[in-house]
Amino acid sequence: MTKANQPGPRHHVLIVDDDRDYLAAAGDAFAWLSDNVWEIHVATGAAQAQAAVETGKIQLAVLDVKPAGSEVAELIGQLRQRQPKLKIVVMAGTAMDETRAASLAAGADLFLEKPVSPEGLNAVFQNFCELLGWALPPPNPAARRSVGLTDLIQIECQARNSSVLEIFREHSLGRIYIEEGQIIHAVCGEFSGETAFQKLLGIAGGTFELRDFELPPERTLNRTWEYLLAEAARQRELSGLRGRAGGAVSGDAVSTEPAGSASELLICAGDGEMLYQWQCADAAARLKLLQNIAHRAGALVFEIQLGKLDRLEIQLADGRAILQPRADRLIFARIAAPFVK
Amino acid sequence: MKTDFKTWFASLPAVPGVIACGVRQPNGKWGGFSDEKNFPAEKIGNLLQQFAELHEPLAPAELPARWTTWVFEYGQLRFVPRPDQWLLLLVVGPETEAAQSLDQFSEIFLALPMK
């Protein structure tokens, strides 16, 4: 049985479980979460699973810990034999250590507890994407109202769109002009250019609308959108770090000067591309640490069942370090003692 | 003096917001408790081990941690390693009395005499 109605390249995912209701629910959920990019195949037992993998199409197999007609370790071996590059995830209602160990020893790539909430399901979906190196689907245009301003700018620029973003808080505060994926002008009150852009992205609680492109009165920006967004992220991160550490933060007035409290800062894209670094003696080592933490913590997320990891805070003798290993961005910041209680 | 530690440790679950707590001794023995079904005793032991391993790359990166806080959507994990190899793990709910007291608990654990 397959469920797919989306043209274009697909990812083929096989779900194996003897509970037909679970198969239907999980299949529908993953198809929806992937915007129908995932073509869901289902099997109620080991024999059907082997037949599905035999086709050579399946890229990810999600196995119930007790598949009908076989032991899970045995089934993992049989599927691997048919398709060595197949990614295999075993899911259990309750993750028991011995079952986890047996599954991983048999060659499973991941062992997870079955999600019991929409948030959990979404976290599992994202974990599958990370395991396979599959991109998360872009937000549906109809859902853009729930997308952040930074996300929307990134989407517009990556798609090489031309548009005008108007930012409001009660009244119009400013505009950002994007032409064929390049940010060419920003205006915010009496400010224009990069200062205006950073002010607009630093505004808390505002709303925005995407409008048809029109030529701006002038062109005041020529830096890449990646740089501009990374700089904005740095400003927000520093503001947030100051806030967490008890420093005064102004939501509107975003300084363009490096903060005196931050002693080191690194911002990378999710794939490790370095977007911004400031006073990192060894940025590559910091990136490696971030990736190491992200990788190892990712596996723990499902064991702990406290939702997604937001950040790791490290209390040091002379300050604090904060690591944020997000799917789309890796951030390392070190703050000197004066801002740490 | 170990009694002092035991008394203090045994009092932790009564703090509103504590989901689970565990401690590992230098000899590898560990103990812990939780009323949450998501944190059976075996899981606490596993987490102590796994978070100890997660600490390993920090010192070579010139980040010798007094403690670490893993902030999740629905809770926080505080991991406190002592120089004498004792380890403390606390799992607390967000915005609870326990979350507010994490630094205090960590300082107490670091200062308690264990012998």
Image (cartoon, coloured by chain):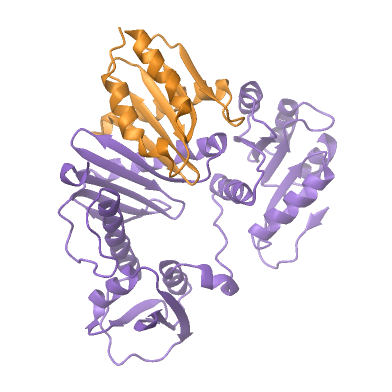
Residue at 43% x, 29% y is B90
Instruction: Report whether A17 appears left or right of A108.
Output: right
Residue at 70% x, 55% y is A29
Which residue occupies the foreground of this view, A46 or B112?
Answer: B112
Residue A228 drawn at (x, y percent): 30, 68
Shown colour of chain A: purple
Which residue occupies the foreground of this view, A255 or A31?
Answer: A255
Q: Quadrant of the C terminus of chain A?
A: top left
Q: Using the image, determine if residue A1 lies above or below residue B20.
A: below
Is residue A179 at all visible to an observer of this figure?
Answer: no
Is residue A16 at all visible to an observer of this figure?
Answer: yes
Q: Using the image, determine if residue A82 lies above or below residue A182.
A: above
Which residue occupies the foreground of this view, A320 or A245?
Answer: A245
Residue at 71% x, 31% y is A76
Q: Which chain is orange?
A: B
Residue B100 lies in quadrant: top left
Residue A9 drawn at (x, y percent): 65, 62
Instruction: Report whether A327 appears left or right of A233.
Output: right
Which residue occupies the foreground of this view, A69 or B113?
Answer: B113
Q: Total marks drawn?
A: 0
Residue A112 drawn at (x, y percent): 62, 36
Residue A178 lies in quadrant: bottom left
Residue A115 drawn at (x, y percent): 65, 43
